[in-house]
Image: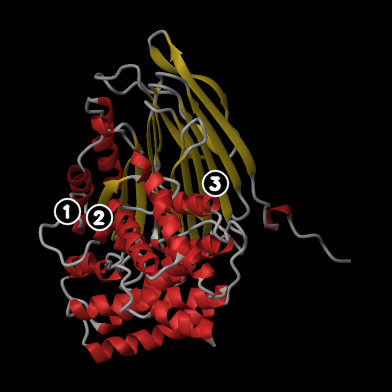
């Protein structure tokens, strides 16, 4: 007779989660009107951190499971009603574990209403050997809404066995509420590419993209945007986004720490320019 | 046989298509790095071919080719290229090259090139290079395979010309690097591109180099 394997030794199937967050304005400040967040995702209570913008709600999104695993299918829908102001960020980087051939998918849908401000700023994903992650974001932004979106990744090989991650893919589509396409940014890189000194990342180990969707008069200068990230040890390049959507910046860094600091600095420049006030440091 | 000769004619660097001013960010990369050697250039060319040309320019070219002259379909691909191209310098360079390419063909008597120039004036099209190549080459008797090979060769040969003009490699060394790219172009051109395949590109280092270089006071190339 053959024993069944212990339950703890059976590889778990990936988790399928659809989380939803909806924000609006009540009593002069932004509130989380509806939330549906299941394991492994977790959100903290809301914080009002900014004296200059006391209505702006900040939430930390966390993974309660120690990272992203093979076969995970994680979805997050964020709806920011007219005139609401919200910043969703992470408390730390998220580890992406070996994808075992199939990998993980994270999907984000954002709706930003008229006069609203929404900043979704993630610390870099940490791509472990064999990790395969596909990020997909679709955002609808009203003409006078503001969206700041930042995502990136860094390589980490904890056992230093020269095993690369499998693949990192990111796809972002930004539209107007009438369906007009503003920005479509789709790209992938295999871990093997990282070894090249003059490959896609120019020999660096971490990369990110920051989008600002806002009216031209609310954008920072591209050099100011770049310099903020450069001062953190990144190499950044900013440009006007397609279709006068705003501004877009790529960042490269030697490691996840420098990239995380560069993303944070870029967020503060973007927030100051679009809101007209300096925001407080987000403690992590 | 005639279609092969047409493809060679279109891939030839002497055809006036404006690509002499287009460096794919290579000039900015040279400035960032300070010095490049032949190994760097070889890696960079291979990366551009795989991470940009095969998955973006080639896909846009094939979609425009398959539009068979339909201005609405060509315009839709063109707008997608605009939305998917990082950086104003790369977008404006691609549109400028496309306009030069159309001008040359229109002056040589191509009806579709003349029609596309008119579509750019009315705003139906934007005139991105890969899209214009696909639309015009479909009318000039190239098949999909030859159109892809002409496009891939033109990109690789343009990079070598740029590198030689920037003094990164000598003329003969550049030809060696170009020859080394040919099997990769042939392999990638043989990969089927399904209808409505998404345009995909991942070259952050060149996009950064191009964005920073666009603000420089002194530069040889438009991007």
Disc 3: which chain? A
Q: Are marks 1 and 2 in contact (CB under 8 Å)?
A: yes
Which of the two discs, 1 and 3, sits closer to the camera?
1
| Residue A158 versus residue A192 in the image, above or below | above
Which of the two discs, 3 and 2, sits closer to the camera?
2
Q: CA distance from mark 1 to mark 2?
A: 7 Å
Q: Are marks 3 and 2 in contact (CB under 8 Å)?
A: no
Q: Secondary structure at mark 3?
A: strand
Residue A93, percent from left and from top: 41, 47
Residue bearing mark 2: B211
Residue sitting nearer the eye, B172 or B21: B21
Disc 1: which chain? B
Residue bearing mark 1: B215
Q: Are marks 3 and 2 on the same chain?
A: no
Q: Residue at x 18, y 49 (%)?
A: A231
Residue bearing mark 3: A106
Locate the N terminus of chain A and report the quarter of the image it occupies.
bottom right
Q: Are marks 1 and 3 in contact (CB under 8 Å)?
A: no
Q: Residue at x 38, y 14 (%)?
A: A29
Residue B144, percent from left and from top: 56, 73
Q: CA distance from mark 3 to mark 2?
A: 29 Å
Label 1: how many Cα within 10 Å (few below 14, some 14–19, many 20+): few
| Residue B90 versus residue B143 in the image, above or below | above
Locate the C terminus of chain A and report the quarter of the image it occupies.
top left
Q: Residue at x 22, y 84 (%)?
A: B169
| Number of numbered tags placed on the structure image | 3
């Amino acid at each position: 007779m053959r024993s069944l394997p212990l339950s703890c030794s059976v590889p778990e199937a990936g988790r399928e989660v659809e989380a939803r967050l909806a924000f609006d304005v009540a009593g002069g400040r932004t509130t989380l009107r509806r939330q549906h967040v299941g394991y492994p995702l977790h959100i903290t209570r809301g914080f009002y951190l900014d004296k200059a913008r006391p209505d702006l709600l900040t939430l930390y999104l966390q993974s309660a499971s120690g990272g992203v695993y093979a076969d995970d299918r994680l979805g997050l829908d964020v709806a920011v009603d007219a005139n609401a102001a919200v910043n969703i960020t992470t408390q730390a980087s998220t580890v992406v574990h070996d994808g075992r051939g199939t990998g993980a998918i994270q999907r984000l849908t954002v709706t930003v209403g008229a006069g609203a401000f929404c900043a979704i700023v993630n610390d870099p994903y940490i791509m472990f050997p064999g990790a395969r992650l596909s990020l997909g974001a679709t955002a609808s932004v009203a003409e006078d809404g503001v969206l700041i979106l930042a995502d990136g990744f860094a390589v980490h090989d904890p056992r230093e066995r020269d095993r690369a991650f499998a693949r990192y893919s990111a796809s972002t589509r930004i539209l107007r509420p009438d369906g007009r396409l503003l920005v479509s940014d789709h790209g992938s890189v295999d871990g093997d590419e990282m070894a090249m000194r003059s490959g896609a990342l120019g020999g660096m180990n971490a990369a990110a993209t920051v989008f600002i969707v806002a009216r031209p008069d609310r954008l920072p200068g591209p050099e100011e945007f770049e310099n903020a990230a450069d001062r953190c040890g990144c190499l950044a390049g900013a440009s006007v986004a397609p279709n006068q959507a705003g501004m877009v910046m790529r960042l490269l860094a030697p490691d996840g720490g420098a990239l995380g600091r560069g993303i944070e600095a870029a967020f503060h420049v973007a927030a100051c320019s679009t809101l007209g006030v300096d925001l407080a440091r987000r403690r992590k | 046989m005639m279609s092969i000769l047409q493809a060679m004619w279109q891939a030839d660097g002497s055809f006036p298509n404006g690509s002499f001013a287009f460096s794919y960010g290579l000039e900015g990369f040279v400035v960032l790095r300070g010095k490049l050697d032949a190994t760097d250039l070889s890696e960079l060319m291979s990366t551009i071919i795989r991470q940009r040309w095969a998955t973006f320019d080639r896909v846009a070219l094939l979609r425009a080719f398959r539009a068979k002259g339909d201005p609405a379909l060509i315009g839709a691909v063109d707008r997608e290229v605009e939305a998917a191209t990082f950086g104003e310098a790369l977008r404006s360079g691609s549109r400028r090259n496309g306009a030069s390419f159309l001008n040359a063909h229109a002056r040589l008597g191509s009806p579709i090139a003349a029609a596309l120039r008119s579509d750019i004036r009315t705003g139906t099209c934007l005139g991105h290079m890969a899209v214009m190549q696909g639309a015009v080459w479909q009318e000039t008797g190239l098949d999909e395979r030859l159109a892809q090979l002409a496009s891939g060769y033109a990109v690789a040969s343009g990079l070598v010309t740029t590198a030689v003009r920037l003094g990164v490699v000598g003329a003969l060394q550049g030809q060696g690097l170009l020859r080394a790219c040919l099997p990769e172009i042939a392999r990638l051109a043989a990969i089927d591109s399904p209808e409505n395949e998404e345009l995909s590109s991942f070259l952050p280092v060149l996009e950064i180099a191009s964005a920073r270089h666009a603000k420089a006071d002194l530069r040889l190339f438009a991007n």
